Amino acid sequence: MLEYLLEKGANTEVRYRFTKETPLYLAVSSWNESLVKALLKGGANPNAQCDENYTPLHLTSINGDEQMGRLLLDGGAIIDKTCDGLDTPLHFASRHGNKEFVQMLIEKQADINLTNAKRDTPLHDACYNGYSDIVGILLSNKANCNVVNLDGNTPLHCA
């Protein structure tokens, strides 16, 4: 059905009235890989932002679906796109303990030292939440362990 609608010119960028979610964002939120593939093929913008400026890749980095993340990145998602708090998908994956997703983002060249609005790096987020495996991954990929956030804390303070 979706393919038929797209063939007939359905607009992939129409947003849900209250949350500004696009059909692609909704497909990602329901973990429907076939819909995501069809929407990307039909020209859906993988960088369209909903409320709080989350992109589909932000959402995927929270739930840790590595395959969906790869699909979005291959479809043109910007790996270091920020949301309202200036968090990147790597911040979210590090904060939520999604080790494989963190590794995949690093392999795809995510900037591991970007800071958010609080000047936290993904390393701060992993330390805050006790994800030692992610801390190890970030450090082995040259994460800066001396970045001072707005509270005056380095990742060491957060560990």
Image: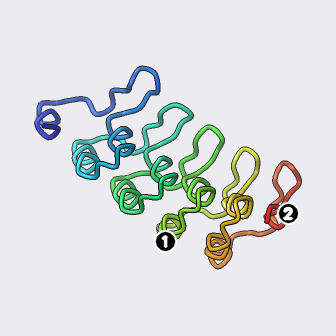
Q: Residues within 10 Å of mark 1 (few under 14, many from 20)?
A: few
* Residue sticking out furthest to the front: 130
Q: Residue at x 47, y 58 (%)?
A: 64
Element marked by disc 1: helix
The residue under label 2 is 157
Element marked by disc 2: helix
Q: What residue type is labelled 2?
A: His
76, above or below 3, in the image: below
Q: In the picture, residue 10 is in which quadrant?
A: top left
Q: Which residue is drawn at 47% across and 47% down?
A: 59
Tell whether 72 sits left or right of 91: left
Q: How far apart are marks 2 and 1 (CA)?
A: 27 Å
64, above or below 49, in the image: below
* Percent of width and height locating residue 105: 50, 64
Q: Residues within 10 Å of mark 2 (few under 14, many from 20)?
A: few
- Quarter that holds the C terminus: bottom right
The residue under label 1 is 107
